[in-house]
Amino acid sequence: MSGLLRFFRDQNSEEQRGQSLVEFALLLPLMLLIITGLFDVARAVWEENTLAYAAREGTRYAIVHGSYGSPAADTTDVGCDQVICVNIPNVVRQAAIGVPNITVVVDYPTKYQPANVVKCADRGCPVSVTVSAPFVPLPSQYLLNGAFQITLKGGSQLVIQR
């Protein structure tokens, strides 16, 4: 019986508790880094999916409001018309709930016809919407004051059918 008591007494000695405390102190930062890394990966995937969804919504709005829409898109305008520069980016920003600092690029890629290259918003012409936003991981945000960031992108291209 005395051997068994000595066994349990040795396991709970001050030395053992000190060793456990040192091991915990060494592993805690690593474990916190892994946990925040998992949260960051999940946040990045969510934001990229949200950007892709927002780009799809912007492209859908663009194909509905082509040359014959109300209001109509005008790709020949030297400046920027209401649909391309205001309405489509607003639709994208409304669809990208929770993602800050969004950059929206709307493009009507050229349509190759036999004799010439035409940029159009008519039936059969493609519309492309690209959305990007900066993503700052949590360790970078709190330890490096946001020095490290990644640009996440989402895009969509559809053909005007109306």
Image: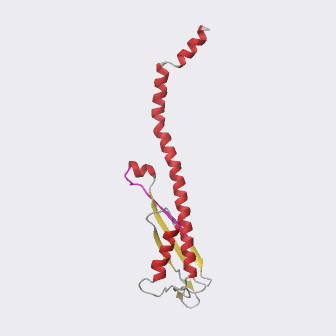
* Residue 50 versus residue 12 in the image, above or below: below
* Residue 101 versus residue 18 in the image, above or below: below
Name the residue nearer the viewer: 88 or 160.
88
Name the residue nearer the viewer: 152 or 68.
68
The percent position of residue 8, horizontal first and vertical second, equals: 57, 16
Residue at 50% over, 69% down: 94
* Residue 141 versus residue 8 in the image, above or below: below
Q: Quadrant of residue 127?
A: bottom right
Report if residue 124 lies within the magenta region.
Answer: no
In the orientation shown, which residue stands out farthest toward the top?
Answer: 2
Residue at 48% over, 23% down: 17
The percent position of residue 31, horizontal first and vertical second, equals: 50, 40
Residue at 51% over, 73% down: 91
Q: How is the image coloured?
A: secondary structure
Name the residue nearer the viewer: 62 or 111.
62
* Residue 135 versus residue 162 in the image, above or below: above
| Labels in figure, total | 0
Residue at 51% over, 64% down: 97
In the orientation shown, which residue stands out farthest toward the bottom?
Answer: 115
In the orientation shown, which residue stands out farthest toward the left?
Answer: 145
Indicate the quadrant containing the C terminus: top left, top right, bottom left or bottom right. bottom right
The percent position of residue 70, horizontal first and vertical second, equals: 53, 86
Q: Quadrant of residue 54?
A: bottom right
The percent position of residue 72, horizontal first and vertical second, equals: 52, 86
Please report the bounds of the magenta region as a residue range. Answer: 144-155
Indicate the quadrant containing the N terminus: top left, top right, bottom left or bottom right. top right
